[in-house]
């Protein structure tokens, strides 16, 4: 339980450090017969690839994925799919300074406290590169979900103080600006804000929102494995996430039962629907057939070039200036990571749901 | 994976419905040698017992716990601890109407969608009574943590629009008002608000905050089993939670690296500390030795006596008026549930941490 | 992971000690919609109930099961099924002597070594009564399997040196003799042998065989969760089992490829079958459509009235004479325990198999 | 749960097919601070490498391991250790015939039944090469165990009808003959037997025995996670195993309580020991401090060049002659696989045991 595995049926295990030989993921439990090639995965990885705008690290990596096992003649075989992405940009530079002190806002101190020492090269296992394995697995999960009509719309809802204006919401805009915002005006304003942050050797946070459409009602398990609980874990396991919401989220604290309850109604085709969706598509931990809406708050990149106070391993109070190629904001690149973790979690819940009733068993064994 | 088990080493499994024979929990993995009697557990259960104020359901239950297994001569044996709390108030009333329609904001529709039918008596498994097992297990977890100097301070931070004033924060006040608020003035104001809600046959939400002190640095696992990710899941698995935060939570989205990073320093005793605690005690998913701070947003009780629109099982659009003995707010009774889930999660992380290094193994087997 | 839970989807957790308040099991993951009443379970428990012949302990227990949760209007709801069997025969006798020394062949010493102390009343958690929870859960698993045409034939294949003659095999005889042997002559001979053992205050071992018919081909997972591997674990987790075989078992060590390979052929209805079944119905960890055949070797009851050498807790070498109501052989009562563990394991494998292919997912979600 | 992961704390996940890009394993949960280099692992892999005698396949593979992650400056970091062994001998030969029919004794039919199709190149995932990942992980587990004084002695106990004579037992002889037998005379006789098998295009089975010394008393969990139950699963998950025993194994069926019970005594140093070890070092699922003794029966290699009857995918009954480079016996190369699975299982049980008592927790957190 060292924590690098998630999922019960669609189970993924990631490995790798920022400046080691590579990053990888093993996906066990992927159903057999899914057409799968490297391009299916690469297009997801490309969404988090560095160096694509002035707002992400200038580290140059192609992040090319190789499928090492689990497919045959272009289809998944049902056995483990091993994916590897080699680290290309392992400059043999001097990490000596980072090795000796604890960067504020990073996991340096806590890794040392837990393990007695750490791989300090580029953050080692706590680096953002760790999310590559998640995205590679998420691409596969999303492909299966798409087969069953389930689609994702994920974007930056807020960058620092700049929040999208929902009246200007334009899904096609998301891929037209480097910040993945569905609002061109907000994206422009956010870019200005980020340029000011960069000028001040500072960094920014933000909010990612994900809307999942087409989820059938009835997915998720009661009590501890509620769909929202498992989404909360999956999203909160992404480094830098400090808050998570479903539906109206924290706003419900000030709502009343009358305003917060979503009335059910039968639509013209006889389908049961909700008149509103404050619940964000999940009731009692189980999907209700409406869109699932979730949000995650990301903290500002902790690596900033400004002078900071900290402690070195000898316990001395020192001033530091962190060098390196860091993102002034991680939100845009985190968009696909949130989508990936949501896809992995939802697929796993759907796979678990196949045995919920005797009736569904009869479809398989009857 | 029907979802009624949580934890890897300190593993709990709950069972029971609102109007069945009782509610129970089996705790497997509790270390041997812990002094444990029913009173240790009862005092936690009493914190969530109904009928203690005008703001909770008038259902009368003593919620008395019985230890059925796992202790011998007053100490835990290391084998499963089975706890049962009988349901006493199972009025044989007519549930016929609830059986036929889907209450807005409840899990009625989603249970039917998943299972094909449901135990509709008082919400069955989706009832708030399900949390009794969590609290009973949480009492044991908290007792072990207290043995190692770890303590919890949990309270209502906000009731509807009324938030505590931190300058008036008084921990002793928490148990002096029925709303478990650490601010007498806010509690009085919140009580007024709730009385207005009741008068309008409406209900309210709120925010629970939990501060955990004394946690050593180094607890939690990287990647998927981050301590905050597991806390997120545990807290989000409580019915009615729609948002979860650690430390500054959603506020980090608007912070900058300079304001959000917590500087490390060595204190006069040579201990490494943080000058601030925006992180809420967790960095990279691992505890940093500061207090762990978490918050959960609870939605307003969905059961309200006002007329609501919904659908019955025949698909007809109808108006309903829900009768019964419902809490106008669940936040005060949820305080101990949040604390319990946090205790269970933290203890499990600490138990998993005993094998993190060869050095710790040597303490056991050397 | 204190070890009282088994299964991934059909997951059972047992609790209880020999002389505590009772024995119980929580079954999580049972599909909704299965008709289930206490009598379904009781008939399995009655097969292991003590006091039914001169060859089992004279302890008097009705072992009556109560369903505490998880059913509604006679059907399973998909939520945890909690079953409890009260201990009735908890004589308040003096266990003082057993508390002070380690009985040979029992778990007294190992429990003390692990936990520092133990519940010594009647063996506590290591008692054979622990298997009651397994049988109660096994009854439910077997009922689901029967719905899909899968049936069990389980019996004593050998009692001490007396082995059944397969030319006299008579399935109907199994329930006609107290030793559950499918061969009346062998049963009579074994009874004579056991009477001699009893006269000599000695005890006997034996072999249980289980044949599972109707299992479709394709059940079980490759590599670590092979169907035979999970059966091996499940059966070996029954106290007193020292050996486990599938198909020809240990005899394969002396076979050759030519004699051991089972030729495939297509029968007159176009179904693929095997001409022989040396494999015992499993190839590569996956069922092949033939009958699954397994065997378990049980050691002689360690509690014997003869004088034995052992050590007390002070480390003194002493002679002991164990008193009490012990079975001279546990094999007949273990028959239903083997069947139960096999049923639980097979059902869990079948439930996991519903997501093996995209095609099966399409049956559920297409 | 597609079955390629085993272990709870020391958790391994294997991947790869016989004729894919390679074979790998990810080890999560290895304690930090263990000195580890590729040579530690390579020496285990070399024990199962093909082509080392006339009795193993002539396939030429160096089976060189690469550590891709999880170590830093020569020590494990506590994060996932990813190991990969490239497949070198992937001859682009014609597999067309194997693709069209089901080889007797192989998993061809069952994989097709489960997944709808299979990677037929060299057996794909069901190939013996799958065990490479097990051995690589086993090398690490064994290194940790050795640090705590636990050692393994594993060998071929029987090859076909030739069993070692225990009066000639010579541990040093094990590595002096290609059959890994601790008895030179038996090894010579077995070699003759195997040469006759080869001459007749036939194959042989056998028995592997493993003796684990130095295990402290108290390891293993009661009920389902008994140490012997988990060993049974781990060993039975090795392809071709059809029987498993602990201690006296199947012989206990004919023993009596008087002969089978092992008397305890206190030795001259005050240590509690057993006068005999019929139990094989485990009582009630928990280690008793004596040597753990286990045995596994392996079936004859199913791939034989003799003509065999089988069925093709069109359902036609056909005669086949399997070509290729197959081991006439797998027992000698399976010796290190058995040792590896035993090491992985025992280490995992020891890691789980660190939280068995409040006293052991105090050693870590007190």
Image (cartoon, coloured by chain):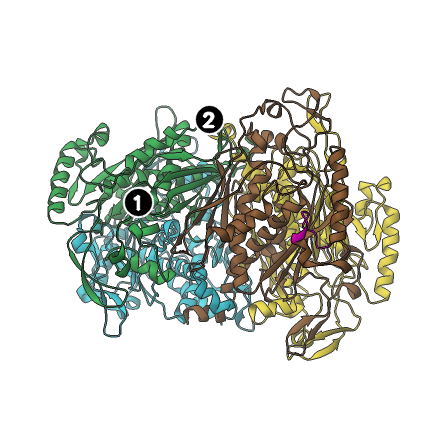
Chain colours: A green, B cyan, C yellow, D brown
> Residue A275, image x and y in percent?
30, 34
Let me know if residue D180 is in the magenta part. yes
Please tell me how crowded label 2 is: few (under 14), some (14-19), or many (20+) other residues with Cα within 10 Å.
few
Q: Residue A74 carries which label?
A: 2
**Which one is closest to the eye, mark 1 or mark 2?**
1
At mark 2, the secondary structure is loop
In this rendering, would D277 be left or right of D360?
A: right
Residue lying at 23% horizontally and 71% vertically, measured from the top left: B267
Residue A104 is at least partly visible in this image? yes
Please tell me whether residue A127 is drawn above or below residue D56 in the rendered image: below
Q: Which chain carries label 2?
A: A
Residue lying at 34% horizontally and 62% vertically, measured from the top left: A113
Q: Which chain carries label 1?
A: A
Q: Which mark is residue C77?
A: none
> Residue C261, image x and y in percent?
72, 34
Residue lying at 75% horizontally and 37% vertically, measured from the top left: D197
Task: Give the residues drawn in magenta, as a range.
Answer: D175-183
Disc tally is 2
> Residue B284, image x and y in percent?
31, 54
Q: How far apart are marks 1 and 2 (CA)?
A: 32 Å
Please tell me whether residue C46 is drawn above or below residue D17 in the rendered image: below
Q: In which quarter of the image is residue C88?
A: bottom right
Circle 1 residue? A90
Please tell me whether residue A334 is drawn above or below residue B279 in the rendered image: above
């Amino acid at each position: 339980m060292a924590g690098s595995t998630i999922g019960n049926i669609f189970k993924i295990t990631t490995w790798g450090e920022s400046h080691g030989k590579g990053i990888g993921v093993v996906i066990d439990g992927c159903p057999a017969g899914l057409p799968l090639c490297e391009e299916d995965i690469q297009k997801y990885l490309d969404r988090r690839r560095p160096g694509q705008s002035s707002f992400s690290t200038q580290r140059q990596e192609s992040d090319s994925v190789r499928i090492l096992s689990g497919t045959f003649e272009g289809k998944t075989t049902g056995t483990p799919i091993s994916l590897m992405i080699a680290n290309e940009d392992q400059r043999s530079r001097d990490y000596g300074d980072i090795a000796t002190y604890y960067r504020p806002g990073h996991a340096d101190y806590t890794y040392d406290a837990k393990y007695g020492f750490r791989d300090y090269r580029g953050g080692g296992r706590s680096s953002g590169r760790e999310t590559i394995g998640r995205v590679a697995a998420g691409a596969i999960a999303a492909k299966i979900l798409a087969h069953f009509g389930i689609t994702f719309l994920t974007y930056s809802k807020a960058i620092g103080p700049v929040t999208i204006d929902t009246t200007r919401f334009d899904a096609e805009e998301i891929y037209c600006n480097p910040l993945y915002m569905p609002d061109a005006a907000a994206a422009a304003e956010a870019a200005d804000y980020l340029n000011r942050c960069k000028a001040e050797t500072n960094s920014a946070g933000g909010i990612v929102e994900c809307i999942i459409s087409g989820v059938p009602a009835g997915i998720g398990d009661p009590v501890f494995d509620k769909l929202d609980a498992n989404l909360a874990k999956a999203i909160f396991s992404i480094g830098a996430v400090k808050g998570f919401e479903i539906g109206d989220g924290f706003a419900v604290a000030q709502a009343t039962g009358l305003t917060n309850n979503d009335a059910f109604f039968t639509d013209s085709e006889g389908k049961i629907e909700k008149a509103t969706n404050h619940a964000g598509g999940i009731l009692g931990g189980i999907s209700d057939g409406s869109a699932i809406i979730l949000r995650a708050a990301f903290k500002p990149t902790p690596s900033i070039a400004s002078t900071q106070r900290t402690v070195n391993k000898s316990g001395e109070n020192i001033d530091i200036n962190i060098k390196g190629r860091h993102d002034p904001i991680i939100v845009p690149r985190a968009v696909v990571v949130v989508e990936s973790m949501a896809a992995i979690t939802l697929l796993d819940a759907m796979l678990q749901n196949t045995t919920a009733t005797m009736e569904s068993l009869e479809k398989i064994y009857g």
